[in-house]
Image (cartoon, rainbow, N blue to C red):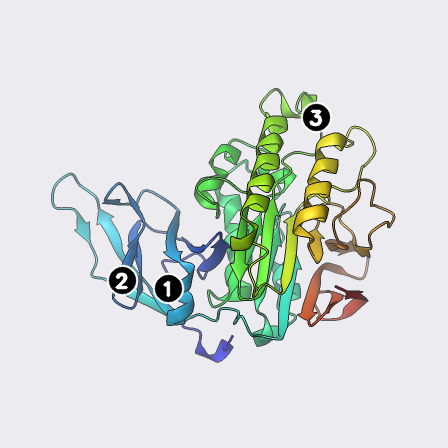
Amino acid sequence: MKLEHINPCPQEFDAFPGVYAVDDKYELIIPVNTPTVMWVEIGEKKYYDDSNGILRSDCTTHKITVPMDVLDDAGKYSVCYRVVYERSPYHPSLSDVLCWESEFYPIPTEQEQINVYHISDAHGDSDHTVDAGRYFGNKLNLLILNGDIIDHCGNAASFLTIHRITGNISYGQIPTVFSKGNHDTRGKFAERFHELTPTNNGKPYFTFRLGPVWGIVLDCGEDKPDDHPEYGNTVCFHQFRLNQTEFIKNVINSADEEYAAPDVKYRLVISHVPFAHTNRPPFDIEVELYTEWCRLLREHIKPDLMISGHLHQTFVCPIGGNIDHKGQPAPVVVGSRHIHTEDKDDFVGAAITLCGNSAKVLFTDGDKQVVDSTDITL
């Protein structure tokens, strides 16, 4: 990532674009503060944000899907838009075409060292998390936002935190992987979460492939039983998790096109909740189902790392460690927490370097100081 080549963020954008990896596609997400119609140009091809042929403008977030291989090969893209002054039924008034151009740096399949920064549980704090997330500077290859980036979905404005963190770390130049957390299920906008964040055809669980890195993103939903009074009879996450069990089995049945492809070097499981851990009541849910997830992942996919948050701690749990209650499929990096003391208000995330048969995990704060570290043999 060449930070000196970043074009200024247009005044109509609320943040730099985020380029989110989902399956074999990228979803470019651009929050805006004024009505616009928008599309992305890669070479001669245009990819529109449209609803059945109608360019969308009654929205605060544009989401445009492009094929991953097309953007990877091009190494650059343009976000093109027109400001909508009046969208009348006849002869609407729009500006001329404006364009914002960006370089893009995919992860080459042959790259030996891959730098990943992981953030979860920001709970609305964008400033400290961005400071921490810039640890690798222009050597960052992949950003992971792993749930509870916002505190709840009570209003649409809260979603800006997600895209501001992504944009202010990646500047739209490197891929980001996003997963949902349990706080992302709360509030009246939670049912529209898929409209404002990256998903695979509306589903927040999916696989991805970025150079030599293959990953599976899983979504545990809430952390208490569906009938817990906190949810007021508004959720059905047990069935949602059962659907993901079938999804995992389908991934296993497609192994050669997924994690068993010949040039895959690293296999990651990304889940906000470290589901191999059985917490105290009422958080001790789905023991049988999560044990099955662990078994399927452990026996078939054989991941190198599982990356989680949720516990508001930073540590690495080896297989058989103190939070391994269900047969975890790989070492687990629990990688985000806040620091609140009289002297310091800060955030700690996980800087993960994959290289050869090892992973170096540094837990770093907003001052780029390493507060702890662990080496993992893969």
Q: Tell me the residue at 47%/40% (across/down).
A: 194
Which label is found at residue 225?
A: 3
Of residue 9 and residue 357, the one placed in the foreground of this image is: 357
**What secondary structure is found at the residue carrying circle 1?**
helix
The quarter of the displayed image where residue 137 is located: bottom right
Pointer 1 residue: 70
Residue 159 is situated, as x and y percent measured from the top left of the image, at 51, 46
| Residue located at (59% from left, 70% from top) | 140
Count of picture labels: 3
Under mark 2, the amino acid is Lys
Element at label 2: strand
Q: Tell me, yes or no, whether the two marked residues, 2 and 1, touch with CB atoms within 8 Å.
A: yes
Left or right? Give the position of 244 relative to 49: right
Front-most of 21 and 139? 21
Label 3 sits on a secondary structure element that is: loop
Tag 1: residue type? Val
Tell me the crowding category of disc 3: few under 14, some 14 to 19, or many 20 or more residues within 10 angstroms, Cα based. some
Res 344 quadrant in image: bottom right
Q: Percent from the top left, x then y, of residue 33?
A: 38, 52
- Residue farthest toward the left in the current orientation of the protein: 91
Precedes in sequence: disc 2 or disc 3: 2
Name the residue that disc number 2 marks. 45
